[in-house]
Amino acid sequence: MYDCLIVGAGPAGLTAALYAARANKKVLVLEAKAYGGQIVNAHKVENYPGIKEISGAQYALVLYEQVKALGVEVKMATVLRVTEDKKVITTEGEFTAQSIIIATGAKNRKLNIADEDEFLGRGVSYCATCDGNFYRQKVVAIVGGGNTALEDALYLTDIAEKVYLIHRRDEFRGERKYVNELKTKPNLEIILNSTITALHGHDVLEEITLKNDQGEEQTLAVSALFIAVGQEPSSEAFNNVVDIDPNGYIISPDGVHTKTPGIYVAGDIRQKTLRQLTTAVSDGSIAATTAILEMKAQK
């Protein structure tokens, strides 16, 4: 029996483990792949308060070592199901805890084209607010049609020399106010009814190839491609103990509690307006503190 079982070893999950361990709780962290979450793919992190610059991988390593030094147990296992009595069934056995914090995050949806992974961190990015500043006064492209893509495009127009906004349909899914504002930006070019079919470059991204609905191709010289075609939350294993919205995110009225007492949520897996490193660690600290206080109240 653990006091606190945390599913996911990204920034939210590891921060929750840090707070729980410092409260002298017996803590288990379960992770399906590798610690660190999406932040490990960030070439540089420059928007975390108090740290001028650090790579995502280095940040994840420091946080992981900090947590391990407090005696937190970390196991590699994929969670298959969670029961209402807080039993966690995994590929490596079953575990029980007084409280469970779900912090499995969400993975960025990919374009699934050749060399997408190869150029990650070298021109391909899934986070304009994280990496946009590296391409100040350069030509960049962003692909997507929802609010995230539109907001990212607005952000990039204040940084880049020129921004291409590429969407596969003839109109955007995002809010009209963003579209109207984008049309006032002189350094923005909107390309509709087109998909990205190829990436080109030597060591770093240099060009992208597009194909429109008529089968016509064009090549754009860009220094970066920001992919904003949505995220895929990792919530399937918890649908019997939490409410999930149509996009797969866990619903929490107050940002920490779920519909099941003793089961909490933190990080990118929950419904929220901003998914950043700062909000992930904030979620983790709040979830752990809430769980600790509520466990104490039950005694």
Image: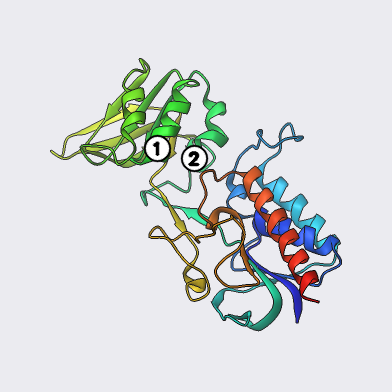
Tell me if residue 186 comes above or below residue 94 in the rendering.
Answer: above
- The total of numbered circles placed on residues is 2
Horizontal side of 247 relative to 62 (left or right) equals left
Please report the residue visible at 70 percent of the width from the left and 51 percent of the height from the top: 60
Q: Is residue 46 something that shows in the picture?
A: yes
Horizontal side of 21 relative to 100 (left or right) equals right
For residue 176, the mark is none
- Residue 206 image offset from top left, x and y in percent: 42, 30
- Residue 142 image offset from top left, x and y in percent: 39, 34
256 and 118: which is toward the camera: 256
Please tell me in which quadrant of the rendered image residue 130 appears: top right
The quadrant of the picture occupied by the C terminus is bottom right
Horizontal side of 126 relative to 93 (left or right) equals left
Q: Find the residue positioned furthest to the left.
A: 214
Tell me if residue 12 comes above or below residue 42 in the rendering.
Answer: below
Residue indicated by mark 1: 149
Please report the residue visible at 62 percent of the width from the left and 65 percent of the height from the top: 264
Density class for disc 1 (Cα within 10 Å; few <14, some 14-19, many ≥20) is many
Q: Secondary structure at mark 2?
A: strand
Q: Find the residue positioned furthest to the top.
A: 186
Residue indicated by mark 2: 125
Tell me if residue 32 comes above or below residue 115 in the rendering.
Answer: below
